[in-house]
Image: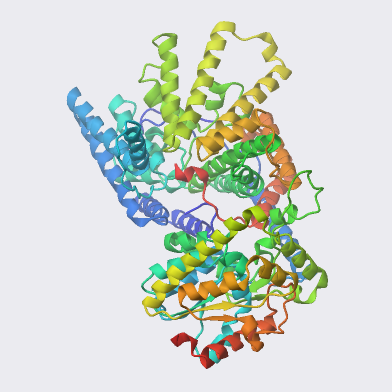
Amino acid sequence: MLFNSLTFVVFFVLVLALHRMPFGWVVKKFNLLLASYVFYAAWNPPFVLLLWFSTVLDWWAANAIARSENLRRRKALLMVSVLSNLGLLAYFKYGGFVLSNFSLGMQALGLDYQAPVWNIVLPVGISFYTFQTMSYTLDVYLGRAKPANSFLDFALFVTFFPQLVAGPIVRPTDLLPQFVRERVATIEQLCWGFMLMLLGLFEKIVLADGVFAPVSERVFGAATLVHPLDAWLGTMAFSGQIFCDFAGYTTCAIGASLMLGFALPDNFKFPYAAIGFSDFWRRWHISLSTWLRDYLYVPLGGNRHGEVRTYINLMLTMLLGGLWHGAAWTFVVWGGLHGIYLVLERGLRARFGELAVWRTALGQVSLMLLTYSLVCITWVFFRATDFASAWRMLQAMLGLDRSGAAVLSSYLVLSALVGVGGLLSTHWYMRDRELHQLAARTPAWLLGIALGSMLLLILITQGEGSAFIYFQF
Amino acid sequence: MTIDRVETNKGSAAPIAYVERPLPAVNLGALTLFALVFALLGLGIWEGYWRGVEGIQPSYRNSDSAWTVQRRRISQGEGDATLVIGSSRMLFGFNLDQWQQKTGARPIQLALQGTSPIVVLEDLAKDRSFTGKLLIGVTPGLMFSGRGFRHNVVELAHKETRSQRFGHWLSQRLLEPHFAFYGDDEYALFTILERQAWPQRTGFDLRPRVRKISLSDADRQTRLWDRVERDPSYQALAKQIWSLGWRPIKPEDLEKHHGMIQREIQRAAAAVKTLRARGVPTIFVRLPSAGPFYQYEQATYPRATSWDVLLQASGAPGIHFEDHPSLQGLTLPEYSHLNSHDAKVATEAIAEIIEREALWLR
C-alpha cells in the first residue's frame, strides 16, 4: 500500500479512528499490528510469512541470548539470527545476482555453464525490516538493549506500518519503549503529523514525480549519447527525484507515526547542503548510515587501528552499503565512489587540516557545490541500468564527447533548473535549521497559505500513484 | 527538542532512548483548518475553471486499472464473452451499446490507444479461460510496427495488488463521476505547464503528445470527444499532431521496415492460430482512416504486404473498410477516428457483415 494512494487514505483514517477509540492499550496495539499486516499484505499476502518468520526467530533468539551466560551459546544464537536474516535477504535479493555472476565466472574460465532462470519476486522492504530485526538481536547480544517483555510489542516493533517498507530503520530503543504506555496523539501532534504527511506527499507527488522524474527519465531513458547539458540536468534532476522520493516517504512515515502518537527519528537533514562527504552521510539516509557505522564499521575496527585499516574499513562499509541498495555492480560502484570520497576527504583533512579560506561564506558555498557535484557523479551509477549507459552519461557530463543529441525540451530544461535551484537553495537555507523552528518563525497566514498550496498542488497534480524508489531495495 | 533519559521504564526492560518529535510553537489546529479551507477554495476554483471556462464534465479515466478490471472479467466467469482488442480506432470506433443492441450481448472492451494489440493477443492466447470470440482492430502503423505505450497493462493485470484494485474502485465511485478536473490526465498540472508555448530549444526534435480526443464510461465504452467533433481549431491541432508522425521510410531502412512487418504478422498469426485451435473464433477489423493519414498508411503499410498477408498467415477472416460500402463515407473529424455517431453506424455494419458472411464460423 502506497502513502500516495486513495487506499491508504481510507486505511489510515480507519486506523486513526480505531486508535482514538476508548479501547485498552493492548487492544490498540493489537489493532496496529493487524493494520500493519494488512498494510504489508496489500502488496503480496504470502510475504507476510517472512515477517512472521523474522519476528518469531528474533524474539526467540534475543530471549535465549539474554537468558544465557554461556558466551559460546550466545554467539551461536546470534549467528543463527544474523545468518537467517541475511539468508532471507540473500535468497530473495541476491540469488539471481550471485547466479549470473557465477555463470559469467564459469564462462570466463571456459566452462559452458548456464545458470538456471531465477524468477524470485523481491518482497517489498525486505532490506529494511531484516536490518531492523537484526539490530534487535545484535543490541541484546551487545547489552545495548534488553529484550522486549511482550511478544506483541516486539511484533509491532518489527511490523509497525509507517516505517515498515522503507524506513527509517529504527533501533529497539527507538520504538519498543513507546509501546509500553498508552500513546495517543494530542491535537497538536495530530495537526503537525498531518502537516508532515502533507510535506512528504508534496515532495513525492509534486516534486519527485511531477518536476524531476520527467527530466531524469527522458535523459536516462535515451538509448544514445545525450548532449552535455542534458546529461547534467538529467543527473541533477535524478538527485532531486531520489531525495524528494525517499525523504518524502520518510517524512510521511514520521507524520503518520506522530498522528498515532509515536515518535520516529529523522532520516534526512538537508543532505545537499553537506560540506564534504562525512557531512553528507550524517544527513543522508541517517538510519542506514548509523546502522552501518554501528554494526559494520565499528566492529571492523573503525578508526582504531591506524590510517590504512581505517580506509579499508571505510571502503568495505561503503561497498556493502552500495550492495544493500541493489543486487547489481552499478550499486557497488556507487558505494565504492562514496568510499573513495570519504577516504580522500579524511586524507586531505589529515594532511592540510582546516584552511581558513574554506570557512568563509564563499568557501563554504563552493565546498557545498563541489560536494553536490561529486555526489551527482555517483548518482549516475545508481540510476543507470548498466555500465554502458553510465559511461555514456559520464562521457557527456565530463565533456569527453559533446556530440550527443538534445533530448530535453525547453520546458524540461527550465523545470530542471528551477527544481534543482529551489532544492539546493532550500537545503542551504535549512542547513542548520529545523522544520519546526522555521514553522514557529513564519507568520501564521503565510504558513497556512504554504500548506494549503501544497495540498492544492498535490490534488491538481493528479499523481499516478507511482511506487517509491526505495521500495525496490 | 527533549530527550527522555530515564534509563528504565516500568513494564519494559529496554532503556528509553527515543526522541520526542518537537512541535512548533504555533496554533496548529487553526493553522490546519486554514490550510484545509485554503486548499478547498483553490480546488473549487480549479474545478469551476474546467467546468465553466473549458466546458469539461466529469468522466471516467481511461486508466490502467480500468483496463485490468475488464481483463479480469475473463477469469471471473465471463470467459465466453466477445472481446474487442486493437488500438484507439477500435476503442473509439466500436460502440458497445450498439453491438449489444444488435447481438444481445455486451462485449468486453480491451483496446488500448496508441498501442499494438499483439501483446494483448498473445496474453489471451495463453489464457485458457478465454473461450469466447475475438475482434481484433488493425491500425497499420501500430499493428505492423508492434509499437505502443500501454503494453505495461498486460503485466499489471496479472500483478495488480489488492491495494491498487481498491484504489481504482474508490476512484470510480468517489472521484471520477464527480470531479471534472480529475477525468483525464490532460488536466493535470504538469501536463498543462508542459503544453504552454515555450520557446523551442535549438536542435531539439519536439514531438507533442497526442491531446485528449476521447471520453470513456466506467466499462471503457469510449467515444470521440465532442470537442474534436465540433471545434475546427481543435481538429486542426489533432491533425497537426498526427502529421508529425507521418515520416516516410528512408530507402536504407526499407529492408528493416519490411522485416518488422513480417515479424509482427508472424507474432499475430501464431497467437491467432493458438486461439482458433482452441475454438475461439477471431476476426480482424480494419476501420476507416481518411485524407493524408490514409495516404500515409497506404504508402507505408500497403494492404498487399500487410493486411492481406496477415489474413493469409493467420487463417482468420477479416473486415476491411475498403471492401464494404457500409463502412465507407463515414465521418473522421481528424482523419483517424470515427465520430461518435458513425462509430455506432460502423459497429452495426460490422455486426451485419459478420452475420451475413457467417464470419464467426470461418
What residue appears at the point 65 percent right and 61 percent down from the top-left corner?
Answer: B185
Give the quadrant of residue A322.
Answer: top left
Q: Is residue B158 visible?
A: yes
Query: Can residue A70 be seen by looking at this rendering?
Result: no
Q: Is residue A446 shown above or below B351? A: above
- At horizontal 28% and vertical 46% (from top left) the residue drawn is A53
Residue farthest top in this picture: A351
Q: Is residue A92 left or right of residue B223?
A: left
Residue B231 locus on image (x, y percent)? 80, 73
Q: Which image quadrant for residue B10?
A: top left
Applied colour scheme: rainbow
Q: Quadrant of residue B36?
A: bottom right
Q: Give the side of residue A117 with respect to residue B67, left or right.
A: left
In the shown orientation, is residue A321 left or right of residue B199?
Answer: left
Residue at image position (73%, 47%) is A409
Q: Position of residue A304 (x, y in %)?
A: 40, 11
Q: Nearer the viewer, residue B221 or A277?
A: B221
Q: Nearer the viewer, residue A282 or B242?
A: B242
**Numbered-mark total:** 0
Residue A99 in picture, x, y percent from top left? 33, 39
**Residue B38 in the image: above or below residue A174:** below
Task: Estimate the x, y position of residue A238 in percent, counting from the top left.
Answer: 60, 39
Q: Considering only vertical position in the picture, is A166 above or below B284?
A: above
In the image, taking residue B322 as reference, residue B68 lies left or right, namely left
Pick whichever, B8 or B36, lies toward us.
B36
Q: Residue furthest bottom?
A: B356
| Front in this rendered view, residue B284 or A68 | B284
Residue at figure coordinates x 24%, y 36% from the top left: A61
Q: Quadrant of the C terminus of chain B?
A: bottom left
Q: Quadrant of the N terminus of chain B?
A: top right
